[in-house]
Amino acid sequence: DVNFVDCALAHFSVTIPGIRENHPYLEPGDLLHMREVNVVSRWGTGQAFEGRIVALRKREGIIRK
């Protein structure tokens, strides 16, 4: 689940399963790579994104980049 926090600054939040249990292990400053996958066909769309993690809300299972 991806939600835009501030479009002008390109800040958005991402819900990542397992972040509460430190798997995957992430910290502010880490570089996050994401690629878009079509759920129906299970093939990549060719879209990819990357960004630096600026905050973690492990209690809620959310990271902000």
Image (cartoon, grey):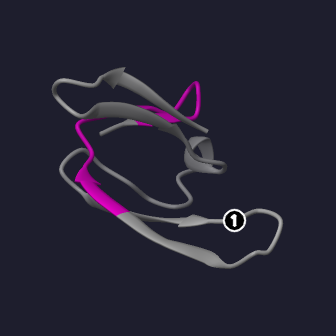
Left or right, 55 with reference to 42: left
- Residue drawn at (25%, 53%) of the image: 51
Q: From what the image shows, is residue 28 above or below residue 34?
A: above
- Residue drawn at (58%, 34%) of the image: 61
Residue in the foreground of this view, choosing between 63 and 59: 63
- Residue drawn at (34%, 60%) of the image: 49
Quarter of the view holding residue 55: top left
- Residue drawn at (36%, 32%) of the image: 12
Q: Which x, y percent locates residue 36? A: 54, 63
Extent of the magenta region = 49-63
Residue in the foreground of this view, choosing between 6 and 59: 6
Residue in the foreground of this view, choosing between 58 and 54: 54
- For this orientation, the residue located farthest to the right is 40
Q: Specify the quadrant that holds the C terminus.
A: top left
| Residue 62 within the segment the image draws in magenta | yes
| Residue 2 within the segment the image draws in magenta | no
Q: Which x, y percent locates residue 3? A: 49, 29
Secondary element type, mark 1: loop
Q: Specify the quadrant that holds the N terminus.
A: top right
* Residue picked out by circle 1: 38
Instruction: Tell me which amino acid carries mark 1.
Output: Asn
Helix, strand or loop: magenta stretch: strand
Q: Which x, y percent locates residue 26? A: 38, 54
